[in-house]
Image (cartoon, rainbow, N blue to C red):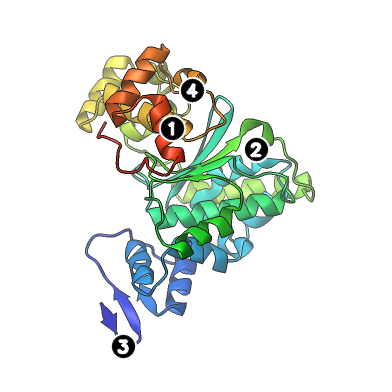
Amino acid sequence: MLRGEGVSCCPVSATPCPAAADPIAAHIQEFAAGHGVYGHELDALWTGLRERGLDSPGLAFAAWAETSVVLGGLLTPILTNCPDLATVLADLERFHPLFDRDRLVVTTLGSSTSVTLQTQAGGPAATDTVDACFALLCRLVARLTATLARPVIVVLRRAQPQGRADREAYRGIYGSVPVAFGQPADRCVFAVDTLSTPVPAADPVVRSLLRPYAERQTSRRGDRQARPWSTAVSELMAAGQTRLPDVARTLMVSTRTLQLRLNAEEQTFAALLDAAQHDTALSLLARPDLPITSIAGTAGFATPSAFARAVRRWTGMTPSQYRTSVLSGKGAGREREA
C-alpha cells in the first residue's frame, strides 16, 4: 500500500523485528527506508522492497551492508580473531543471538558442513532473509580468510530466478559457486577440508578476552531457553543421529518419554526423520561432486535401495533423474509432498 513517497508495512501476521533487540532488523529497516519503505515487520519490509522494484531485496541488502557494522561491535573482533574457518562458524552459531532473532545452525554430515538459518520456532527463515544471511556469510568468510575459503554450493528453497537482473545478482554475490534453486531446504555448504583454512590476522589473546563477555550477553538474551522437543530432535537428526534410542539418550529422556513429548506437539519421530532425510538427501543430490552411492549412508539410510525408494516417493524420480533435473534447472516444481 502506497503512502505518499513510501510504502507502509503493517501486516497482521509477520515476523516482528524490534530494532532495539535485533541489530540486523535495524539495518534492514534503514536500508528499506532508503528505498521509501517503512515499517517494523521484517516480512513486510521485504515485500515492500519487491514492490519498489528490487527483485532480490535480500541480496541488495547484503551488497549495501557493511559486514562489520551489521554484525555489531562485539562480534566483529571475536570473529576477526578466530584461528580458522571452523572456529568462525562455531562462534557465529554460538553468538548469532547477539545480533539477530533467527538462529544460525551449523551441522556436519560426512564431508560437508552446512549452515542453515531457522526461525526461533525451528522452521525455515524467510527466503529473502536467507539470501541476505548467506550473502553476508560468504563476504565475511572471504574477508577473514583472504578469499582462500568459499562454499562448495549454495542450495535454496526459492524458485529459479527468471529475470536476467535477478540471475546476475546471484552471480555477483556467489561468483563461480554453484547455486541450486527449488531445493527442500536452504543450506550454505562448505567442504570439511576447508574448515582448517586460517584467519591470517587472528590474535587469539583478543578473542579469549572478548568471549567470556559475549557468553554472558548471549545467556542474558535467553539463548538457552527451552525449545520445542521437535526442534531439538530435528537438529540432532540433521547432525547425523537418526536412531530413536540415540536421540533419546542425547536428550536425557527415555524413548517412551520422547515419543510422548513429540506426540504432545503433534509430531512423531518417524515423520521428523523422514523430513530430515528428505532435506539432507535432496540437498546432497544437488551437489554433482558427490557420488550418489555415498549419499544414502550420509542421509541415514540403511541401504541404497531404501534411499532410492524414498527419493522416488518424494520426487517421483530416481536419484540420478532428480540430480539431472536439478542441475538442468528443471527440478523445482516436480517434487512431491513427502
Tell me how far mark 4 sits from mark 2, CA to CA.
27 Å
Instruction: Name the residue rendered at 73%, 39% in the picture.
Output: 197
Which numbered disc, 1 or 3, marks the residue that appears first in the sequence? 3
Q: Amino acid at mark 1?
A: Arg
Q: Nearer the viewer, mark 3 or mark 4?
A: 4
Q: Say which element carries label 4.
A: helix
**Circle 2: is it few (<14), some (14-19), or many (20+) Cα within 10 Å?**
some
Distance from label 1 to label 3 (Cα)?
48 Å
Q: Position of residue 201 (x, y in %)?
A: 79, 51
Circles 4 and 2 in contact, beta carbons < 8 Å? no
Quarter the N terminus occupies: bottom left
Q: Which residue is mark 4?
A: 292
Rounded to the nearest angstrom, the CA distance separating label 2 from label 3 is 48 Å
Q: Position of residue 15 (x, y in %)?
A: 32, 58
Can you give x and y, in whole percent of width and height, for residue 3 in the image? 28, 84
Label 2 sits on residue: 86
| Quadrant (top left, top right, bottom left, bottom right) of the C terminus | top left
Q: Nearer the viewer, mark 1 or mark 2?
A: 1
